[in-house]
Image (cartoon, coloured by chain):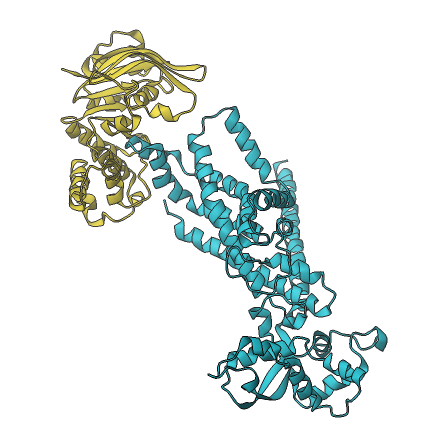
Chain colours: A cyan, B yellow
Amino acid sequence: MIRKSIQSRRARETRLKIYGISSICFALIMLATLLISIGLNGYSALQQAYFKLDISVNTEKFVDDSGAPDNNKMNLFNWDGLVQSALREFFPEVKERDEKKELFAIISANAGYDLKEFVKKKALGSGSHTFSVWLHLSDDADQYLKGRLSIDIPEEDRRINNKQIAWVNSLVERDIAKLKFNKTFFTSADSREPESAGILGSVIGSALTLFVTIMFALPLAVMAAIYLEYFAKPGKITDFIEVNVNNLAAVPSIVFGLLGLSVFLSTFGLPRSAPLVGGLVLGLMTLPTIIIASRASIRSIPPSIREAALGLGASKMQAALHHVLPLATPGILTGTIIGMAQALGETAPLLMIGMVAFIIDIPTTFTSSATAMPVQIYMWSDSAERAFYERSSLAILFLVAFLISMNLLAVVLRKKFEKKW
Amino acid sequence: MTSKFRTKKVEVSYGDKKAIRDISLDIEKNIITALIGPSGCGKSTFLRCLNRMNDVIENCSIKGSIHLDEQDIYGPDIDPVELRARVGMVFQKANPFPKSIFDNIAYGPRIHGLASNDSELKDIVHNSLEKAGLMDEVKDRLNDQATGLSGGQQQRICIARAIAVSPEVILMDEPCSALDPIATAKIEELMNELSESYTIIIVTHSMQQAARVSKKTAFFHLGDLIEYNDTDKIFTQPENQKTQDYITGRFG
């Protein structure tokens, strides 16, 4: 009898184990599929098609008497013309206006601007100079070189026609155009042209926003948790607060965006699209998460420690700050980083307060216009250009890497603050 | 003999449930008084009234009066924080802070500002450890974690920590219940030495311990004080039948 029941119990245990392992495997496979597909889409954005031009320029037209570049004169100078004439030297047969237009379409529309920035950085003295410079090809040429534009479809449906393909191929054959590491992606902000667009602006925007979030939410949440655990007299008001804190954690994030819009922007008149406002809104959103985690962490500290402190004549506040809080720190930190990770990936509330704007400058202060990484991904994925598609995939990988490093930080901090008993 | 504590008709209830009723007893100065009785008889509750540790517990209410040196400790001008500096406490389970031995002892003096500089603080710590008979055992590792010591040593750290604030009274809530006989013997010896300069009130489950260390004993049963007398009397000629039954092991 007993042997029979043991057998069936064992069988049940084995079945349960198989269920568990298979569900873990399923989850891992899904995760791997997701990451691999994003990775396959995004890895090509690490490279970008460049072409090399030999430029001769007389700097007298845009430097002042001392030889320093004059901004006004530089802006007026015809950089596009310089690039275009240099390019035409490779293809002397192109004469007609329409044909010329097609030729110039294979290089980036920002090539002239990039050349200007290059010259400005180089700080050439007064006089004639000859130098070579690598500039971006257009996104269509770039996609063609990466094999992401199919040439099987009819010419009129393609973003790049046969003539342009021939020019690009001839540039590649002459070793003038090639794929190089896409530095621009990591050093610039958003742009209308995929080849000039980068994530640095949104990374810095996210960093500024998260800084405000943690500065706002962490102290507030910890104080609230200590108060609710140790000072609040149990009663209807405390119950009411508790229920509301728990409810807030479940409120859809877009509601916090609306709140930010009506309170921070309309009532307080804070600037739109600013990391300051974004941080405050995300701080409000993560506040309940951190409060709940902090309370759980504080509650897990053995009451004997607190009694020991109180028995020595420590006040309630001293017992909480000197003994309970340091011991609860690992738990609070974990909760905080989970909250921060949630805030980092949040898009909806930021849309409401205008952080969805197209911003080409890298933000420098808490009130300058900025966007955030998830918003940047959202905007790129919405763009028509094929080259933005691979960029948004790469940006997603970047965001995931950011999240993983935040979680690693949580583990490290936890280990560091954890006390052995 | 002068009284240190004088309690009159003390009644404690948790919500609707009365934990102790009508406790009136005087506790004498500089002796050891033992509180004995079966589990749930209210002896720990009574002990925690003496330094207002019950304040921390929700919905706990106290009636009656407790005077420490003729001063009502539940009076409006008494700060429980100040009271707890005068009436120290050692708990059932040794609860050193997860800090160094030195910081454990120094915590009380630090928060009360008893030392004006580092060398004074050091003196206080050394004296307290000396009095607690721990100095020889830990003098080389004052910076080690107190939680790494043995159970008996941890409990003596807690006693040293209580002494460091120079209290007048030390309350001990079953301080030896988790210790082996050797560690218990050490703590009892320590209590004897300390009773010369401190009033000690100990709650204990062990009647032998009460008989060994205390001068006076109070027997509690179901929230009532049944008998309070010299320890010798209680253990040899108890006046009450219940006391007789308890000390002879008929219940409890």
Viewer-proximal residue among A386 and B70 = A386
- Compared with A87, A344 (above or below) is above
- Compared with A215, A248 (above or below) is above
Image quadrant assignment for residue A275: bottom right
- Compared with A368, B211 (above or below) is above
* Quarter of the image that includes the N terminus of chain A: top right
Give the side of residue A218 with respect to residue A250, left or right. left
Viewer-proximal residue among B113 and B140 = B113
Give the side of residue A131 with respect to residue B114, left or right. right
Name, please, the residue furthest toward the front: A65
Residue A349 x/y as whole percent: 62, 48
Judge whether residue B248 can be spotted in this image: no
Q: Identify the residue shown where x is 53% and y is 51%.
A: A276
Give the side of residue A12 with respect to residue B150, left or right. right
Residue A38 x/y as whole percent: 67, 64
Residue A385 x/y as whole percent: 73, 68
Q: Identify the residue shown where x is 69% and y is 79%.
A: A107
Q: How many marks?
A: 0
Viewer-proximal residue among A276 and A46 = A276
* Quarter of the image that includes the C terminus of chain A: top left
Q: Identify the residue shown where x is 59% and y is 46%.
A: A265
- Compared with B239, B192 (above or below) is below
Image quadrant assignment for residue B35: top left
Judge whether residue B48 can be spotted in this image: yes
Residue A419 x/y as whole percent: 37, 47
